[in-house]
Image (cartoon, grey):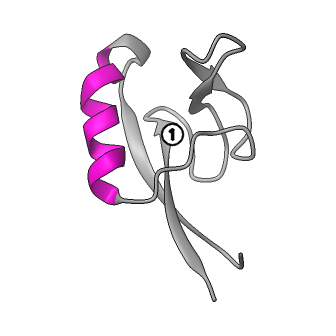
């Protein structure tokens, strides 16, 4: 059954072409290069909340919707 999740992509990047919000080795918010490394949000509200919290720090995000066959 497909699962929908949300990624925060740099507003300057094309869909499917990264920089995405992820975490660094210390667990802090950081930009990562691929969607596989990106932080996955299970709800749109959670993605929007995080984008509002850290968006200015990283020059803004767009929300990318993805589906997986988990």
- The residue that disc 1 covers is 9
Q: What segment carries the magenta color?
A: 44-56
Q: At 26% from the left edge and 39% from the top edge, which residue is drawn? A: 49
In the rendered image, the residue lying farthest to the front is: 26
Q: Quadrant of residue 68?
A: bottom right
Image coordinates of residue 58 in percent, x first then y, are 43, 17
Name the quadrant of the C terminus. Answer: bottom right
Magenta segment includes 2: no
Name the quadrant of the N terminus. Answer: bottom right
Q: Is residue 54 above or below residue 51?
A: above
Dominant SS type (magenta): helix
In this view, the residue in front, 1 or 56, is 1
Circle 1: element type: strand
Image coordinates of residue 18 in percent, x first then y, are 65, 38
| 37 to the left or right of 52 | right
Magenta segment includes 45: yes
Image coordinates of residue 23 in percent, x first then y, are 61, 23
Q: At 32% from the left edge and 47% from the top edge, which residue is drawn? A: 46
């Amino acid at each position: 059954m497909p699962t929908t999740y949300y990624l925060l992509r740099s507003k300057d990047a094309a869909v499917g072409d990264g920089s995405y919000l992820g975490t660094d080795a210390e667990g802090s918010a950081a930009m990562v290069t691929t969607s596989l490394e990106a932080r996955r949000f299970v709800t749109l509200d959670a993605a929007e909340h995080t984008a509002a919290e850290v968006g200015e720090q990283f020059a803004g995000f767009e929300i990318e919707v993805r589906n997986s066959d988990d």
